Image (cartoon, grey):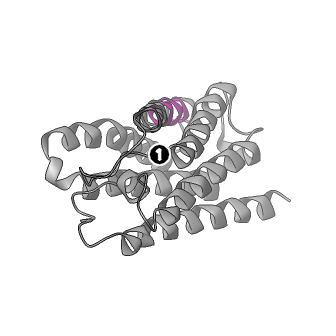
Amino acid sequence: MFRTNRLIVVGLLLASFLALLLAPTQMPPSYDWLRHTTSESGAQGIAGAWLARLGFLLFGLAVLAETAVLRKQWSLPPRIFLGAFGVCMTAVAAFSARPWLPEMPFDPVEDWLHSFAATGMGFAFALGVGWRWWQRPWQARMRVADLVAVGASIFIPLAMSFLPDWDGLLQRLMFAVAYLWYGLELLNFEPKLERLS
């Protein structure tokens, strides 16, 4: 049963990754995936934004499912933080960002809710992955993956502040790190090596 549930989560992660990878193909010509973020590919009033929103939704559901699948293996703090990431990701799907096109109308409250959920998602991911790093002293390979993931969740948003023309590429790199971390956490789980705190 654990193996079946694990495969379902992997399938959700892959479907989400594919949706976000293909989302720029549904955008108007003015969309530049190097400059514009994944949030902008799911922006308010943009035709084709449904694909990015579907990607966000599937990612959130995948993480919530992974939290359930690993509920006996993860201690309570990572379950709370990483589960919060899943909830925030589904909220990002529900509340869309403002479009990059300045002439298009948008709902500022929805844009604020999107930003709030995205910020919460970043904090939840860093805290949840950091807790996992702290609780597994004997898994060197995964501890390195934890450090890379936490570093990406902290330093890539900072880099985006200084390199706005590369926002899209940097954010996609951050998403790729998150996908890889969740996938590795699920596929490389070794119950006999876990020391829950």
Q: Which of 155 and 31 is in front in this view?
A: 31
Q: In which quarter of the image is residue 85?
A: top right
Identity of the amino acid at label 1? Ala
Q: Which of 167 and 97 is in front in this view?
A: 97
Q: In which quarter of the image is residue 64?
A: top right
Coordinates of residue 116 in the picture (x, y in percent):
45, 31
Coordinates of residue 62 in the picture (x, y in percent):
64, 54
Q: Is residue 157 above or below residue 8?
A: above
Coordinates of residue 65 in the picture (x, y in percent):
71, 49
Q: Is the magenta stretch mostly helix, strand or loop?
A: helix
How packed mark 1 is, by other alpha carbons closer than 10 Å (few <14, some 14-19, many 20 or more), is few
Residue name at image x 68 percent, y 36 percent? 74
Residue name at image x 26 percent, y 59 percent? 169
Coordinates of residue 154 in the picture (x, y in percent):
32, 35
Which stretch appears magenta? 124-132
Quadrant including the C terminus: top right
Q: Is residue 40 above or below residue 80?
A: below
Q: Is mark 1 on a helix, strand or loop?
A: helix
Q: Which of 75 and 53 is in front in this view?
A: 53
- Please name the residue that numbered disc 1 is placed on: 140
Quadrant including the N terminus: bottom right
Residue name at image x 36 percent, y 69 percent? 27
